[in-house]
Each structure stands twice: as C-alpha cells, then as structure tokens.
Amino acid sequence: MLWKWTQVHELLIQQRIRKDLLAQAVKESSAMLREGYKVFFDRLTEQQMPLLIFSAGVGDVLEEVIRQNNVFHPNVHIISNYMDFDQT
C-alpha cells in the first residue's frame, strides 16, 4: 500500500499541478457528482445538518467539483488528502 501511495505521489509531483489552474482543469474534466446531489446537499443545508465527506482522493479536486456545482454550502466539511502547492 505504501509503495502505491509513493508512486501516485511522485506522479502528481511530476505533473507540476498549479493551484491557479485547478479550477479550469476540473471544469474541462468529466468529474461529476452523483445523480440527486443537489437535492441532497440543499436539503441538508436547509435542515442545518452538517455534511461530512470523507475521501481518499484529492481534496482540492473534490472541493472544486462541489464548488463548480454550486453546492459547497457552509455545512459541507471535507476530510481528505490536500495538495501542498509550491509557492514558486
């Protein structure tokens, strides 16, 4: 398992992903939320219930997908792996 994580980590570093281009990359991708997501997210917001999303994926990407679908409400909390972007 550790070797797989290391390989994926190295591949991500090689891609030189830039934070300022992440939104556009998500927009151009085929990433999507499941059918019925809007009703689900909105109803939890209306009821003031927290929505905790646990993901083994890349949190930055997941968060951007949710933002672009206009359902990143104040009650949404994502626990995931986030990228640490270079400042250069």
Image (tube, rainbow, N blue to C red):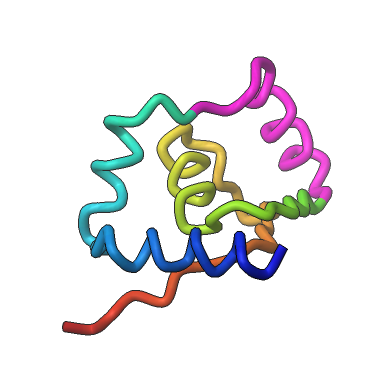
Image position, residue 21 (x, y; %): 22, 53
Above/below status of 7 relative to 65: below
| Magenta highlight range | 32-49
Q: Residue at x 59, y 48 (%)?
A: 73
Residue at the farthest bottom position: 87
Task: Pick the quarter of the image with the C terminus.
Answer: bottom left
Is 25 displayed left or right of 71 in the figure?
left
Image position, residue 76 (x, y; %): 67, 52
Is 43 displayed left or right of 87 in the figure?
right
Q: Residue at x 79, y 53 (%)?
A: 50
Residue at the farthest front position: 3
Q: Is residue 29 magenta?
A: no
Image position, residue 23 (x, y; %): 30, 47
- Using the image as rendered, state which of residue 48 and residue 30 is in the foreground: 30
The reply to whether residue 51 is visible in this rendering is: yes
Q: Is residue 47 magenta?
A: yes
Above/below status of 8 relative to 70: below
- Using the image as rendered, state which of residue 6 and residue 22 is in the foreground: 6
